[in-house]
Image (cartoon, grey):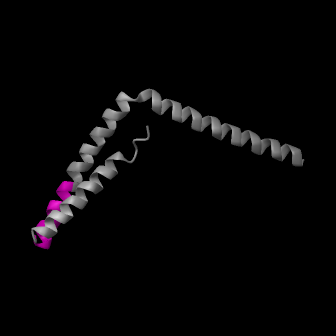
Amino acid sequence: MKTRTIPALIMLLAGAVACVAGIMAKLEIVSFTKMLLIVLVVFYILGCIVKIVLDRNFPETQEEETTEGNTALEEAVEEQEEKENQEK
C-alpha cells in the first residue's frame, strides 16, 4: 500500500474544511491565518500517525511492491545493457 501521500492529503482536506468554516464565520485575516496554521500542523501530525499505523499493519504488501519495482528496474537495466552490447 502506498502511504506516502496520506499525511498531506489529510492535512489538505482539513485545511479546505477550515477555510470554508472560516469564510462562513467571516473571521478576520489574522485570526483566520492562525487558526489555519494550527489546523494544518495538527492534521499533518495526525496524518503521520495514520501512515505509521497503516505501515505497521500492512508491511508485506509494501515489501511486495518494492520487490516488484526493483525487478522491473533491474530488467530495464539488463535490456539497456543488451542493446548496448548488440550495437558494439
Q: Position of residue 24 (x, y in %)?
A: 13, 68
Q: Is 3 within the magenta? A: no
Displayed quadrant of residue 67: top right
Q: Is residue 42 above or below residue 71?
A: below
14 relative to 1 in the view: left or right = left
* Residue 2, picture quadrant: top left
Q: Residue 48, image x and y in percent?
A: 30, 42
State the residue at coordinates (33%, 52%).
9
Quadrant where the N terminus is found in the figure? top left
Question: Total of numbered circles in the picture?
Answer: 0
**Does 33 sit above or below residue 74?**
below
Point out the residue furthest to the right here: 88
Which residues, given as a range, are shown in magenta? Answer: 27-39
Q: Main secondary structure of the magenta part?
A: helix
- Does the magenta segment cover residue 32? yes
Q: Give me the residue at 81% from left, 41% from top.
A: 82
The answer to which of 14 and 87 lies nearer the viewer is 14
